[in-house]
């Protein structure tokens, strides 16, 4: 599963929530897993938790706004580290423009942003259209990332795939395995005795059933 990290200002939390709703289809399909700092449990160290998930993320979404750029934590810590990993090919950074701001002068300004042409989501008459564009971009990025990291995912499903694709090769053997059987006189006599007993019981049962169904029929054998 591709891990997705949200880097955002808490002032933009409502838009982050809306984006996560639109990414639900990808999460349900098992294509991605998402994380943001609101997932940190009580008593855990905030900085170390954020750093750990930032280092493990395959895709890092920068939710860009004036508040994001003004935040020392978002800009100086999360964004700078995200760009370092992006340049090394360790992760993919996708800028998502929430509100109008001077983002093109930022270190991520040369990256392809979404929505199309970096149009801020807040400027769309219907913001669902904007979030749909973002969702499609994240889906494409996740699919490309999965192909690039295919050995990692192949290892996770190797046993199942191997069992499914394995060809069962039968042992090499002769097709003529019959052995000629010679019956002894004792075996022949035993067979005749068992056969006679079976036939006698068959006729006895048939006559009994015939008499039960037809009382007028005399099944007694006069000797």
Image (cartoon, rainbow, N blue to C red):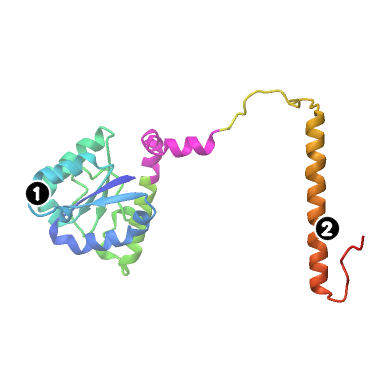
Q: Which quadrant: the N terminus?
A: top left
Residue at point 39%, 33% (across, down):
151
User: In terms of sequence position, does the residue under pointer 2 or pointer 1 come before the other?
Assistant: 1
Please say whether residue 134 is one of the residues in the magenta stretch.
no
Measured from the top left, where is residue 101 in percent x and y?
A: 18, 56
Crowding at label 2, few (<14), some or many (≥20) Cα neighbours within 10 Å? few
Which label number is shown at residue 128? Answer: none
Residue 149 picture quarter = top left
Q: Which residue is mark 2?
A: 203
Main secondary structure found in the magenta portion: helix
The single residue placed furthest to the right in the displayed view is: 223
**Vertical arrangement, residue 22 with respect to residue 58, above or below:** below
Q: Which residue is mark 1?
A: 44
Report whether 117 appears left or right of 176: left
Residue at point 27%, 35% (across, down):
90
User: Viewer-proximal residue, 165 or 169?
Assistant: 169
What span is in magenta?
Answer: 143-166
Crowding at label 1, few (<14), some or many (≥20) Cα neighbours within 10 Å? few
């Amino acid at each position: 599963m591709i891990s997705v990290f949200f880097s955002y200002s808490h002032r933009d939390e409502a838009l982050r929530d809306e984006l996560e709703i639109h990414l639900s289809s990808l999460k349900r399909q098992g294509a991605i897993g998402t994380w943001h700092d609101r997932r940190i449990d009580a008593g855990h160290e905030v900085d170390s938790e954020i750093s750990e998930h930032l280092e493990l993320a395959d895709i890092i979404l920068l939710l860009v706004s004036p508040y994001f750029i003004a935040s020392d934590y978002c800009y100086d810590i999360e964004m700078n580290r995200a760009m370092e990993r992006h340049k090394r090919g360790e992760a993919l950074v996708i800028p998502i423009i929430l509100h109008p701001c001077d983002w093109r002068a930022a270190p991520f300004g040369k990256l392809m942003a979404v929505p199309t042409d970096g149009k801020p989501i807040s400027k769309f008459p219907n913001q669902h259209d904007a979030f749909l564009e973002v969702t499609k971009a994240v889906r494409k990025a996740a699919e490309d990332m999965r192909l690039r990291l295919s050995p990692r995912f192949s290892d996770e499903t190797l046993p199942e795939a191997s069992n499914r694709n394995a060809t069962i090769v039968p042992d090499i053997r002769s097709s003529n395995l019959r052995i000629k059987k010679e019956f002894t006189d004792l075996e022949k006599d035993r067979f005749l005795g068992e056969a006679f007993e079976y036939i006698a019981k068959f006729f006895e049962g048939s006559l009994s059933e015939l008499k039960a169904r037809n009382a007028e029929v005399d099944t007694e054998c006069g000797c």
